[in-house]
Every structure is written in C-alpha cells, then in structure tokens.
Image (tube, rainbow, N blue to C red):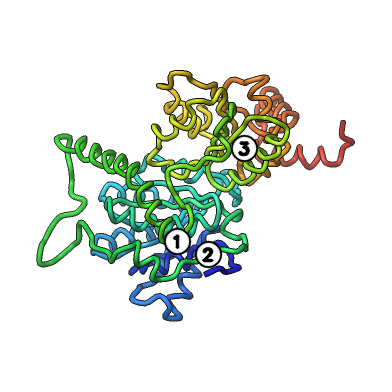
Amino acid sequence: MLKQIEGSHAMAEAIALCRPEVICAYPITPQTHIVEGLGELVKSGELENCEFINVESEFAALSVAIGASAAGARAYTATASQGLLFMAEAVYNAAGLGLPIVMTLGNRAIGAPINIWNDHSDAMSMRDAGWIQLFAETNQEAVDLHILAFRLAEELSMPVMVCVDGFILTHAFERIDIPEQAQVDAFLPPYDPVQVLDPENPASIGAMVGPEAFTEVRFLAHYKQRQALRLIPAFSAELGKIFGRATGGLLRTYRIEDAETVVVAMGSICGTIKDTVDEMREDGVKIGVVCLVSFRPFPVEALGEVLAEAKDVVVVEKSIAVGVGGALADNIEGALRNLEKRPRLHSAIAGLGGRPIPRDSLRRLFETAVTDPWEGPHFLDLNDRVVGREIHRVRKVRRSGSTAENILRQLALTSQLPQD
C-alpha cells in the first residue's frame, strides 16, 4: 500500500508486520519516532500479542531484548550514537549468545564534541561485534531490510542491525510502499527459536568458556556470518518476488558496465552520488557506482567481481578510523588485493557530523582521483585555513584550550571578516 509517510513511521509499520513479541524502547534521537510509532501500534491494538517495555537506558533496552530472545520471544529494539556505545557490552553479548535480535540503528555521529547529526561513526564502532550490519539507501529499502532482517536473524540465530541514516531517512516524508500482512507472512515464518530457556528442558546460556573452546566458539560465529553471504542474496530475491521490486542483496550497481571509475559508498549518500554520476555521464565520463548493503559480513568476492574492470575506485564514507583512515576503504582494499588488474584505490571521508555533501564537491573529487590521485584519506571540503590556524595555535600556546571550541570561535570570527 502506497503511503505518504515519515521514514521512521514506515519502518515502525514494517517492523509491526513482522509480529515482534517484545519491543524494548528507550528514546534517543534520531530513532525515537520508530519506537514511538511501534508504541502507538501496540496501544491501539493493531500490533497484537506484543509487550512494549519502556526501559531506563539503552543498556537496559538491549539487555531486556537479550532476555526476551533467550526466553523464546521475537525481540526488537532501536538505538543511535551514544546509545549504541552505552549498550556496547550487551551488543557483544547478543552476538556471542547467538540470539536473533533485530535492532535499528539511526546512524548519528559520536561525541565529543556533541553532535546529533548523521554519519556512520556509531555503526563502525561495533563493526566487529558479531552483528550482521545492513545499510539502507532509501526509506523504501529500510522498510524491506527490516523484514529481511528478521528472516535472516532467525535462520542463522544471530542478531542483525539495520542501519538507516539519521534525519536524512528517519525524518523524511515521502511515498513508500508498505507491504500487506499477507505478503510479510508469506516471507517470514512464525518464530521457531534455535535455543530457548525451557524449564522442562534446562540448559545454560552464556556460561563461562575457557581457552579450550573459545576459539571454536568464535570460529562458528564467523562461519555463520559467512553463511549470510549466501542467504542475503537468496532471501532478497525471494522477498523481491513477493513484493514485486528489487530489494536488499549484498550490493547494488549503477552504470558500471563500461565504467573506468567506480565509486563505492553506503547509505543515503548513494543517491547523491548517482545524480553526480548521471551529470558526468552526460559529459562522456565513464563512471559508475556500487552501493554496499551488507557491510558485515563484508562481500569480498562479490565486490571484487564488480570492481575487476575498473581503473580507479573512489571510496566515499561517512566515518573516520582516527589514525588509520577509512574503515570502509580498508575493507575494500582487501577485496581488491587478489584482482589480476588491481585498480587504484582512493579514500575520501565525507559528511562527518552531518556536513552537506554537494554534487559539485563530489564531481571535483571524482575528477581529481583520475588526474591527481592522493595518498591516504582525503577529507572532502576540509577547511584548510581553520585547520592550519588551530595547528599553529597548539604548537605556540601551551594551554591552547579545546580544539572544538577553538574551531567554532575561528569560524564565527571568519564569518565577520572580508573573504578572499
């Protein structure tokens, strides 16, 4: 059913169609509207046989979901940014216990300094926690990925994180096709847990494991993630047949058939990159896009196949591994390592803390990658003047103060001065 609806409420309706039995809710911008929408559906009776639990913290939200899932309930929660960090111990526990919890992550920057706008810092902080991580480009895809996530989580008995760009997707109103209950039921079978706490069949969950078995436990978690590389395309194809539209998959390509330059990115920025590619194609530039859906597990083979003929690969990512560069670029470099003709890899950090990513800036970036490639990560639209002044200050003044406040002060002063 087509609806003009906010992205968060569309996701809430899709999650409700998956018939969760326990929803653990704690508000943190920008995911709050999702759990609020689910709360309204439970209260109105549209979502039946579901316990909506208001908890006192993000850590409690996932902890309650862990308990509910271990008891045999289909469990869901959501968080963002600092909330994900607060529940970090529980994030690892959920994966280590092999519990099929689905969690929405409304992607948002991590402080300090405080910032509530979108980037992918939060998801990257938990990239090795053992969760499957799926990134949505659009709100329509976010709807579909949540339904896919429940099927995938329960098939593998492992948690799935659906990552949606905060504000850009969560708060955007647009026309979205919400599936019917019968369609979701045709795809998602009733929950039949692999492991469950049953008084008639006592078992330990989360017991102490020493050196004699810990490696094997971790190997099997890795093995299940590798299984997901096969299941994600298969389930996406099945879901696409039911819904009548392409959805999910490990990755999607756009205009790469003869592309000499291929851009790789995740999330909503792919839409802006596609617009930029269309403009450059009109000018005869052979360029295309690969939009990653699955970041964990990372689709090394699938990515290598679509990048095999490229001369240049430009990675645009909305996070920074401080002291290293781009986490996504680092993973992509591994995918290119065994190619017979290895393309040049160019890493670009963009959109941190919600900074706009204009098409003009992207076009300059893509053109520069071919004509004047750089070493290490490039920071898109970095204010070199402000950075240079702060570096100079720190070198000259012992008590130079907080970098964040100094930068803001410089920007305020610069806005009052005549520009070059």
Q: CA distance from mark 2 to mark 3?
A: 30 Å
Which image quadrant is residue 258 in? top right
- Residue 376 position (above or below residue 215): above
What x and y, as percent, mark residue 186? 34, 65
Quadrant of the snapshot with the C terminus: top right
The amino acid marked with disc number 3 is: Ala
Question: Element under label 2?
Answer: strand
The residue identified by callout 2 is 177
* Viewer-nearest of discs 3 and 1: 1
The amino acid marked with disc number 2 is: Asp
The amino acid marked with disc number 1 is: Phe
Residue at (69, 33) in percent of width and height: 382
Using the image as rendered, state which of residue 181 and residue 24 is in the foreground: 181
Q: Are marks 1 and 2 in contact (CB under 8 Å)?
A: yes
The residue identified by callout 1 is 243
Q: Are marks 3 and 1 in contact (CB under 8 Å)?
A: no
Badge 2 or badge 3: first in the primary sequence? 2
Using the image as rendered, state which of residue 388 and residue 179 is in the foreground: 179
Residue at (50, 66) in percent of width and height: 178
Question: Element under label 1?
Answer: helix
382 sits to left or right of 420: left
